[in-house]
Amino acid sequence: MMSLRVRLSLILGAAFLLIWSFAAAWMLYDLRNQLSQSLDQRLGASAHMVASLLKQMPMPDKVGDQSLTAEQLGMPNGIACQVSSLRGEVLVRTHANSNQVLDAQQTGFHDQEIDGDHWRSFTLVMGNLRVTTADRQSERDGLRQSVLLAASVPVLVALLGSLALLWLGVGRGLAPLNRMRDALKRRSADSVEPLVVPGLPSELQPLLETQNQLFQRIAQTLERERRLTGDAAHELRSPLTAIKTHLQVARMTEGEARDRSLAHAEEGADRLHRTLEQLLLLARVEGSLSFDDGVQCSAEEVARLAIHDARQGGRERIELRLPKDISSAAVEMPSVLAIAALRNLLDNALLHTPADAQVVLSLETDGDKARFCVRDHGPGISSDDLQHLTQRFWRNGKSPGCGLGLAIVQAIVQRCVCSLRFDSQADGLRVELQMPLRVQA
């Protein structure tokens, strides 16, 4: 796996190479053109200078092969000069080789080849004379290569230096991230304390805060699981002890006493079974398991199925109140969880309502929301205890439940983006559960 430093260096280095290569190519191309223009200007200036000198020097009366040195005509090194008549007769030249006669028929700049050598020449007409200056193309190319090489070396050195500084700079910039990595490596496996790394830049602060939030959630989860394990062990120990005691009594007695002991043992087994089912449901709701089985239920169907699944003997005590204009849209959550949440509210209301009183379930729909209101006729609960209702295994006084029903409802509410509200009054507790509805097209 490629490291972040290598990845950043490659990306930024490639960008540097691309930009520097383009800039260098542009610069060298422009330098090449400028150098060619300068050499051409030197030819033209030399031709004008020779023309000025010839006005002051006597010219031969007849055609000959008179040769003059470059110093006599003031020519720079490497430039050949030839003076000829308009008829093409060579009068004066700086090169002694008679085979190398410059073509002076065309005025201005032009390229020509003489005895296999390529020349760049400039011809100037002065009266009845033509002044031609020229230099070899090979010498011009050599000069251009020398200049381009001299200009390329600093560019190459600067590019290599930039890449080296880039590598060091990226490593320096990633140092805070390395410090965070080292701090994480030094932590013990079971440590959930907040991570403290001083001197972090602002870009890494959100990462540190997110990491600490994760540790906080892990700590809360571990604490919750530890409390669940302790509370579950305590809650399961009580019915198991009661079952064992009643079975021992039944073994030692006969007749009606034995029947009562067996009945109490059966009640303890039922309570233990309900507690285990609630624990399993709570673990599934708080976990990552999916409850979506593809079944869609409307709010009215959720209410009727929850009444049907209510604890045995309590269905006849529940009064369902429905408006005339109730929506038929399906709830926007797994139907299993919707029914379980409402059923637990009904079971809790039945536990705290006298046997001769009714539990009222009201349902209203408004746009994309469905509101279920469960009202019991129990003694109510103090305002100080309302905040403990959804805690695991919390019971008010001598409540016959196991203390998991409302905790499961709260877990479903948090998982499915619902809302739960309690309102305790003198004539009983009112619980409002709000669920989202699917938007009908």
Image (spheres, rainbow, N blue to C red):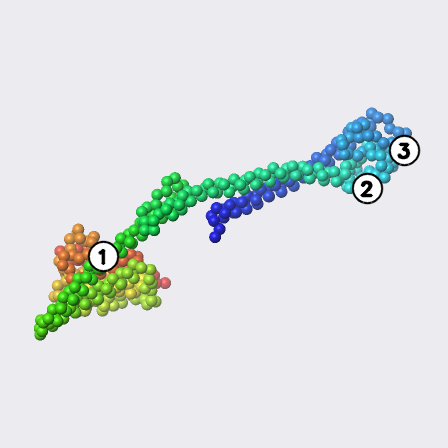
Q: Secondary structure at mark 2?
A: strand
Q: Residues within 10 Å of mark 3 (few under 14, many from 20)?
A: few
Picture quadrant where residue 93 is located: top right
Q: Nearer the viewer, residue 421 or 438?
A: 421
Q: Residue at the spot x=31%, y=59% of the render?
A: 287
Residue 130 location, x and y as percent?
82, 34
Q: Residue at the spot x=65%, y=37% of the render?
A: 150
Q: What amino acid type should be assigned to the residue bearing mark 1?
A: Gly
Q: How far apart, in angstroms, are the residues tagged by discs 1 and 3?
A: 126 Å
Quick check: marks 2 and 1 in contact, CB under 8 Å? no
Residue 25 location, x and y as percent?
62, 42
Q: Is residue 247 above or below residue 69?
A: below
Mark 2 or mark 3, earlier in chain = 3
Q: Which residue is mark 3?
A: 63
Q: Secondary structure at mark 1?
A: helix
Q: Residues within 10 Å of mark 2 (few under 14, many from 20)?
A: few
- Mark nearest the camera among 2 and 3 is 2
Q: Which mark is residue 230?
A: 1
Q: What amino acid type should be assigned to the residue bearing mark 2?
A: Ile
Q: How far apart, in angstroms, are the residues tagged by discs 2 and 1?
A: 107 Å
Q: Residue furthest right?
A: 62
- Mark nearest the camera among 2 and 1 is 1
Residue 164 location, x and y as percent?
53, 41
Mark 2 or mark 1, earlier in chain = 2
Using the rendered image of the protein, determine whether residue 219 is visible from the camera's viewpoint: yes
Q: Residues within 10 Å of mark 1 (few under 14, many from 20)?
A: few
Left or right position of 43 against 309? right
Q: Which residue is mark 2?
A: 114
Left or right position of 411 against 142? left
Picture quadrant where residue 339 is located: bottom left
Q: Nearer the viewer, residue 18 or 46?
A: 18
Q: Is residue 192 above or below residue 237?
A: above
